Image (cartoon, rainbow, N blue to C red):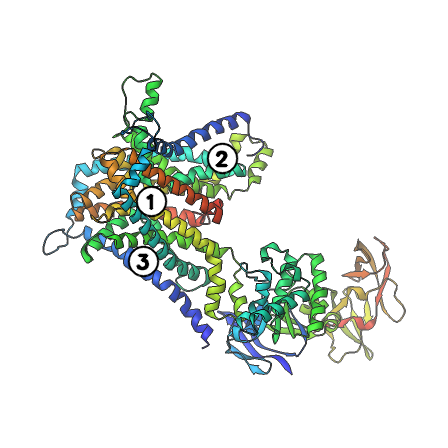
Amino acid sequence: MQKLSVRSVTKRFGELSVLDQFDLQVDDGEFVALLGPSGCGKSTLLRIIAGLERPDSGSVHIADKPVTDIAPERRNIALMFQSYALLPHMTVVENVRFPLRMRARYSRSEQLEKAREALDLVKLEHLAGRYPRQLSGGQQQRVALARSVVSEPNLLLLDEPLSNLDARLRETMQVELKRLHERLGLTTIFVTHDQEEALGLADRVILMNKGRIEQAGTPEEIYRRPRTVFAADFLGGANIVELEVVKSGRSWKGKFPDGTTVPLTNSPDLEAGPRSFVLRKEAITFQPVNSMAVINGSIETQNYLGGQTRSLVQACGVDLIVVTDSEKTEIGRRNTRIGWRVEELVPLEL
Amino acid sequence: MSAGAWRANREPAILLGPGVLFLLLAFFFPAFQLLAQSFLTFGTEPVQFTFEHYAKAFVDEFYAGVALRTFRIAFTITAICLIVGFPLAVIIARAGPILRASLIVIIILPLMTSVVIRTFGWLVILGPGGVISWTLEQLGLIDNSISLMHTEAGIIIAMAQVLLPFLVLTTLGSLSQIPPSLEEASRVMGAGFFQSMFHITLPLSVPGLASGSLLVFALSISSFITPSLVGGVRLQVMAGSIYQQMTGSFDWGFGSALSVILLIVTLLLIVPYMILVSRAGGRQ
Amino acid sequence: MIAATPRWVMALATTFLVAVAAFMLVPLFVVVASSLSSSAFLVFPPPGLSFRWYGEILGSEAYLRAGWTSLKLAMVTVVLALALGTPAAIALSRFRFAGRATIASIFLSPLILPSLIFAIGLLIIFSRYATGPSFTGLVIGHTVITMPYVIRTVSANLADIDPNLDEAARVMGARWWQRYWLVILPQCKTGMAAGAFFAFNISFDDAVIALFMRAPSVETLPMRIYSTLEFSPDPSVAAVSSVMILMTMVLVVMLSRVFGLSKVV
């Protein structure tokens, strides 16, 4: 069953086109990340799914029912706001009970019991009687999470769920969110601008740009095989290299600005001429083997990252960032051999 | 269109409607009536359009004298409020929490007390056999009891106390937006206490001082309770003579014309005040 | 104070503060002092101490009636100012619509127009279209001048709350009336309380509108005090005034408790 289907949704704010003929299908139980820079339309899409904005054209279906004209309060979904939007005049347990109370589900005592169960799920049962302002940021978020899952919604929508937390708490909450998803199996869609969050949490990442899908796929696909300059740039793990593609006999080669050539894997869309390639920072090694593409360069600077070392290498007229697990620093070494497995140099779409 | 969208358009209208309607009827309609009245004959049948009330206001030397006195008093009050209010605001802005809170209470308490009661206090202080007279007598400076009642000085002293809070509060608004680091930086760069006060604090609080002065001036030309109780009938100010026309001699046409003149002067002051306040980020 | 303030400046500042405090508070102090005088005349210093003027006002039907009128007037004003001002503040804070700035300035315009001018307009209206000044006229006048305060305090209150609460409640299934009753109004509580304090204080203390809307049958406390001062002030006025000063002090304390003094100014 498809839990959510967004069909050619278009949304404009005045002159500005925010979503353009947008399509998205989400299966039951999926954990999907909408990833993109601010202004890419991801938040508007989330608000359209929730019913807080109306699409100019196109339709939204939840659990195979059209909901485009249905008010948010009748959609049986949950949305966790970036600011958590806890009701400040109600206690924690009253906040968590609120969705059940509004939908008049169960008796009062059953509602309270369900609310306590949801709080137990996020390990906050002991704070049930407190007011939101008496809680830390992390605790407030857990309350918001409990409130989102208590009504067993068709869809769980999360808007930048981790952005208001500090780095350490963010790591714990990532684990927590994943655990909660596995336990409850709720179809979850979350919006984020942080690629680490998207890659770490989701089963499927939808990378958005200017109101369209730039690339969609599993976290591994998105990270290892970005298809466009935008995707490679946004995911940030890669060097983007401009090469001249030349035919040499029956195989293709890539020519660096200084004339050095490296082998390329055969790919049907290759043609002679300038082309951008992506080369992940981790794919480059200082101990190349013979089957690899190998070039000479010089190490300009190195930063120790704790467990890893990042080096800036100048080679064949380009700057390459190399991240290795070794902790050796070799600044200023000229004629360092660096190499990569041929298939790691991935051509980007024209 | 869904029910939600319908409400999104109608909700503000439903919420604002009663208030707007009330203000149109109870506020703008009376203001308009006042304007109309100033151009109409009063007490004659039929009612006719006329400029005679304005002509009288501008020709009659008595009212020229009243207007002159009103502005003289207002200027003096504004000057006093500036001289006293600026240092007071600076001190409040920098005081520790306890001193700050007590100073604000000292400012707010009289502000929230009825103007008739504050004026009453000044009557007791300024009058014959009052606090000032008694003190001066005790010091041997005067032989017979004196009175500041029915003097412009008395009016000015009493009204300055009534209006000082307005200047202090607007200036405080400006001062609170100056980061303390600015002045600290100027001190580190070698400016003395008064140099940094003069080059940093004073210029940056000009918007607050200016809007506060305009407010004080506008309020002082339109107040009549303190001037009439302290000044009496002989020392009339504009607002007082308007009160006289409306409730004493029942010349509503003339009273309305005087009010419109007062209103125009006030608006000429209040418009720059509004602009200053909205530029400053609108605190008061 | 900045640590590097010269010592002699501190000394000067202290003297200045004492002088200003005296200037602001002595007028209130002498009123209270006069109310405790045993003399029938307002002389300084009072010849002796007595509470008899408080007994006097408690036995005076004119003062009691004026007090009751003022109290009724202030309470009706508070209710009306809240009823009209709160929804307007909610609309102005929550919605963005064409003409919003204009409507906001319409609501705040009674603060700009001197109340003297407004009082005259009101007098003309009530004489022309009604039976002359009346209690209703006072209620209307006071509602006009106090409503802006309610709008300001409630708006300030709403500006501090999470703008997503309403949408969050919607997604959780709350219908519009549930959102107003359970989400929006509870957020306005402190603003409404502060607005009510202001409205009560302004209405109870007002003399300007009251003097213009003076009707033979309606007399408020400030009107009574004003006419007594005009003709024959005696310590019983001081006693009434002292009671009103005490009420103002109580209101200031309550305001600072509910809202915090920094928000009041």
Q: Is residue B81 above or below residue A61?
A: above
**Above or below A167: residue C57:** above
Q: How would you rate the neighbour count of disc 2 (Cα within 10 Å): few for under 14, some for 14-19, many for 20 or more?
A: many
Q: Are marks 1 and 2 on the same chain?
A: no
Q: From the viewer's perspective, tell me whether residue B194 is left or right of residue A141.
A: left
What residue is pinned by disc 1?
C205
Could you tell me how far apart the alpha carbons at marks 1 and 2 are, in whole angstroms?
30 Å
First in sequence: mark 2 or mark 3? 3
Query: What's the CA distance linking mark 3 and mark 1?
Result: 22 Å
Q: CA distance from mark 2 to mark 3?
A: 40 Å
Residue type, mark 3 in image? Leu
Disc 2 is placed on an element classified as helix
Identify the residue under disc 2: B91
Can you say which quadrant of the picture contains the C terminus of chain A?
bottom right
Rendering quarter of residue A147: bottom right
- Between disc 3 and disc 1, the foreground one is 1
Relative image position of residue A37 (x, y in whole percent): 62, 65
SS for callout 3: helix
Q: Given the image, what chain letter belongs to the residue carrying mark 3?
A: B
Residue B31 visible from this viewpoint: no
Q: Of C89 and B49, which appears nearest the observer?
A: C89
Instruction: Indicate the chain on which mark 2 is placed.
Output: B
Q: Label 1 neighbourhood size at 10 Å, few (<14), some (14-19), many (20+)?
A: many
Outermost residue toward the right in this view: A290
Residue bearing the label numbered 3: B23
Question: What's under tag 2, amino acid-wise?
Answer: Ile
Q: Is residue C19 left or right of residue A110?
A: left
Residue at position x 30%, y 27% in the image: C43
Q: In the structure shown, which secondary structural element does the residue marked by tag 1 occupy?
A: helix
Relative to B129, residue C171 above or below: below
Please provide percent x and percent y for residue C32: 36, 34
* Residue type at the position of mark 1: Asp
